[in-house]
């Protein structure tokens, strides 16, 4: 499969504040194309708009937002957790939210699932709510073997605790005869996109027919990551999900989804 190497751009307010009026007008016009279709400030009952895979993961609310905690026991699949929107979303999507890493982990990952459906093989129906009971223990392979979705790893670390951190995209499902890394959408941004515990980041993800992008903003700094998906099998519709691997916790606020 052809991959086109994209780029990482790190900008500061010094750069962004000196954009031309023409560029600002173009950005405004682009923003106006998006329609807000989902909104949760994270301070109220999460069960109205979300469902949870995993019997041990928890969600708590405060004025600071929605505190999503996977279970504390590493290497126990029952301690993973996945929050899913009850709604499905079609076409091009933009997802944005505020994120604060509340763990001190240097292992394991957070994942954003973008428009997930079942792969329609056997019992794995298109509507993933139909086989939610199979995900009470939310093993990773149940997802990457049986779902159609894009996956972005963020606030992500290697599993050995030796300092690897990254931002990475994948396209599910994994073919039976291929290794897990065969589903990576290149490039992989290794040793980039580091999240510090306790700091608030504003995250924006956009998926179009040709491009997948991930932007993280903190104070006057912006990091941008991009993948060419024009020759990757398209994802048309599905639910949005947030996975925390065991031991991972974070605060979410002002979660919004837009479509065109």
Image (cartoon, rainbow, N blue to C red):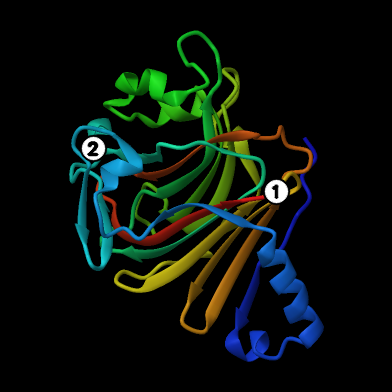
Q: Which residue is mark 2?
A: 79
Residue 37 against residue 106 in the figure, above or below = above
Residue 174 against residue 65 in the figure, above or below = above
Q: CA distance from mark 2 to mark 1?
A: 33 Å
Quadrant position of residue 91 = top right
Q: Is residue 44 left or right of residue 86?
A: left
Q: Is residue 53 left or right of residue 124?
A: left
Which SS class for mark 2? helix
Residue 197 against residue 40 in the figure, above or below = below
What residue is shown at x 38% (from left), y 19% (from top)?
131
Q: Nearer the viewer, residue 53 or 71?
A: 53
> Which residue is most to the top?
122
Q: Position of residue 230 (x, y in %)?
A: 78, 43
For discs 2 and 1, the disc positioned in front in the rendered view? 1
Quadrant position of residue 225 = bottom right
First in sequence: mark 2 or mark 1? 2
Q: Position of residue 15 (x, y in %)?
A: 67, 87
Q: Position of residue 178 (x, y in %)?
A: 60, 24
Which SS class for mark 1? loop
What residue is shown at x 39% (from left), y 49% (from top)?
109
Q: Is residue 35 left or right of residue 131?
A: right
Q: Is residue 60 left or right of residue 148?
A: left
């Amino acid at each position: 499969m052809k991959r086109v190497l994209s780029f990482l751009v790190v900008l500061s307010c010094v750069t962004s504040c000196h954009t031309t009026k023409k560029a600002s007008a173009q950005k405004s016009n682009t923003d106006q194309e998006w329609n807000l279709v989902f909104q949760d400030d994270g301070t109220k009952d999460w069960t109205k708009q979300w469902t949870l895979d995993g019997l041990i993961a928890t969600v708590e609310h405060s004025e600071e937002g929605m505190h999503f905690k996977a279970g504390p026991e590493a290497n126990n699949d029952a301690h993973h957790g996945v929050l899913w929107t009850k709604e499905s979303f079609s076409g091009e999507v933009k997802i944005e939210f505020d994120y604060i890493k509340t763990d001190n982990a240097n292992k394991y990952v957070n994942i954003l699932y973008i428009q997930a459906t079942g792969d329609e093989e056997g019992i794995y129906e298109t509507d993933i709510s139909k086989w939610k009971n199979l995900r009470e223990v939310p093993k990773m392979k149940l997802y990457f073997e049986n779902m159609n979705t894009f996956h972005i790893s963020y606030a992500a670390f290697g599993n050995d605790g030796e300092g690897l951190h990254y931002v990475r995209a994948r396209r599910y499902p994994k073919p039976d005869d291929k290794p897990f890394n065969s589903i990576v959408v290149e490039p992989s941004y290794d040793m980039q996109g580091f999240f510090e515990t306790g700091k608030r980041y504003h995250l924006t993800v956009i998926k179009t027919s040709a491009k997948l992008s991930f932007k993280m903003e903190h104070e006057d700094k912006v990091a941008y990551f991009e993948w060419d998906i024009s020759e990757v099998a398209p994802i048309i519709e599905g639910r949005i999900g947030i996975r925390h691997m065991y031991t991972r916790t974070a605060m979410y606020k002002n979660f919004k989804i837009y479509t065109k």
